[in-house]
Image (spheres, grey):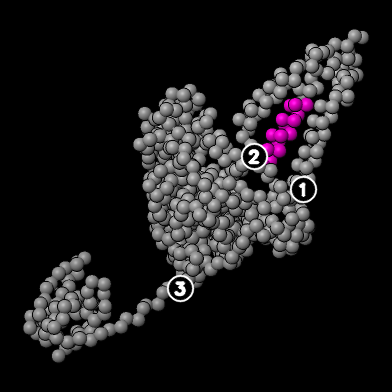
Amino acid sequence: MKRKKIFSGKIPPKPVMIIAALLLFAIYYYIALPAVNIHSVGLWKFILGFLVIILVLVCAPHIEQTGDSRRPIRLHLVQKSMRFKVILSLIVILGAIYFIGFLLSSPIINAKKYQQLMTVEKGEFSEDIAQISYDQIPLLDSESASILASRKMGSLVDLASQFEVSDLYNQINYQDQPVRITPLRYAGLIKWFTNKNNGISAYIRIDMASQKTELVRLKEGMKYTLYDHFGRNLYRHLRFKYPTYIFDDISFELDEEGTPYWVCSVSQYKIGLFGGHTIGRVVLCNAITGECEDYSVEDAPSWVDRVYSASLLVELYDYYGTLKHGFLNSILSQKDCLSTTNGYNYLAINDDVWVYTGVTSITSDQSNVGFVLMNQRTMETKYYEIEGAIEDSAMSSAEGKVQNLGYVATFPLLLNIDKQPTYFMSLKDASGLVKKYAMVNVQNYQIVSTGDSVAECEKGYTTLLKENKVTEDEPEPVVTLTETSGKIQKIAEAVIDGNSHYYILLDQSDDIFDVPVGSNLTIIRYNVGDPITFEYKEGVDSKTVINIKEN
């Protein structure tokens, strides 16, 4: 049967093929945006993909239909094409390097190097984690923040038709308060065309302690975001400024003046071609102007909270905990292998955001052997050896306390309550709103307290600690009394909180002495000019008389 060619028998002219290849090359690069860096997996895929396209263009003129059902298509005379052989050889060689590079960069061969990527120090819980005030406890997770932001957005008629709330809810410390912030985004491509000249004019800030939600309007809109297109798309903007940088986590943050920035972490690979992923630099991109500043991690401004993503920190700690005795041990005997639990949360300490997660033994995951705190700006990591319930058990205990209401617990925070490591969590209803709060003792998850407010919850919790002999009542402090004598120069009566007090001044002294009448009734016998002797204790604004001695 006569063979039928699928394509024209003539090979296209070289210029046409070159132009077609370059056009495909440019389109693919503009969309994929791989870093021009030997460590970039995207670059290797880009090169291999480009070579495959070239191979197809070279082979296309030689593809024929044979008319044979057993072999309907065949390549005609391709084997004799030098171009085909060269391109195919390049694909095979680069593919082999790519595969071998992955193998030589893996923990299988480099277990010790992976284990040493993170430095872990032992910490003292009661010293490192101070008891924080109620207005600094982050009460909301990202889901609850999303609900509050959506409600806020729905009430803004002028913006709701053009913008919507993005799915970024980064937790940062802003002016010493834990907040979640999220930018708005264009509600579709058409809305981008109609609003791109002014940019995105606002972002939403949610106070995680008070749950106050506010829309912050900007004098000038954000024109460089993840939601823009063409040259203003953040990824494309960064790629053309830093063609060799492999960008990892990108977060939305505010400087101390409230100016929105994109904090763009730059990946660093310390093991082979593709292994030992950590962060080497950070680029700060002004979301309004697009201006960029490049810093090493150590030199990043102090207001930056998130250089290392939580997932990267958890991954690095898992390498540290599981590879102490090599890769095979982490799979087979698993001696001394520790790993993080199945979740994490964030804690604000000294104007930094720390990732908290529990640590459990791989061979026995029913309880924690300790927990770690990992600084998202510096990667400083501290391990606290405190045995206790895993977070899931604590969450179940808290939910069991309010099972009649059907509330669901958020992943816990770790707090210091009366020098006791304590799981703190919010309890949410079916709509995702926070209704109650719970505290669970880490070492005894049967000690559970709930309350409608944090203060009420803590009050019940501290009472339970004393009832269960976990803590004891503080002994009354020893009060030092001082005796003094003199003539009364001035005396005045006042009623404070329903109790009568006399305030007296003695001659040759500027001190004010407070005499509670209830415990010193004889003071009513004294007048100006009378001599008096008494014992007193030091106070903040005055000296409190404890005992009047009769002359």
Where 8 falls versus 154 (above or below)? above
Q: Nearer the viewer, residue 478 or 160?
A: 160
Residue occupied by mark 2: 36
| Magenta-span inclusion, residue 203 | no
Q: Position of residue 11 (x, y in %)?
A: 79, 16
Determine crowd level at label 2: few under 14, some 14-19, many 20+ residues with C-alpha closer than 10 A. some
Residue occupied by mark 1: 103
Q: Earlier in the sequence, mark 3 or mark 2?
A: 2
Determine crowd level at label 3: few under 14, some 14-19, many 20+ residues with C-alpha closer than 10 A. few
Where 145 falls versus 28 (above or below)? below
CA gap, disc 3 and disc 2: 63 Å
Marks 3, 1: nearer the viewer: 1
Q: Amino acid at mark 2?
A: Val
Circle 1 — which element? helix
Provide the residue span drawn in magenta. 40-55
Majority secondary structure of the magenta segment?
Answer: helix
**Image quarter for residue 98?**
top right
Determine crowd level at label 1: few under 14, some 14-19, many 20+ residues with C-alpha closer than 10 A. some
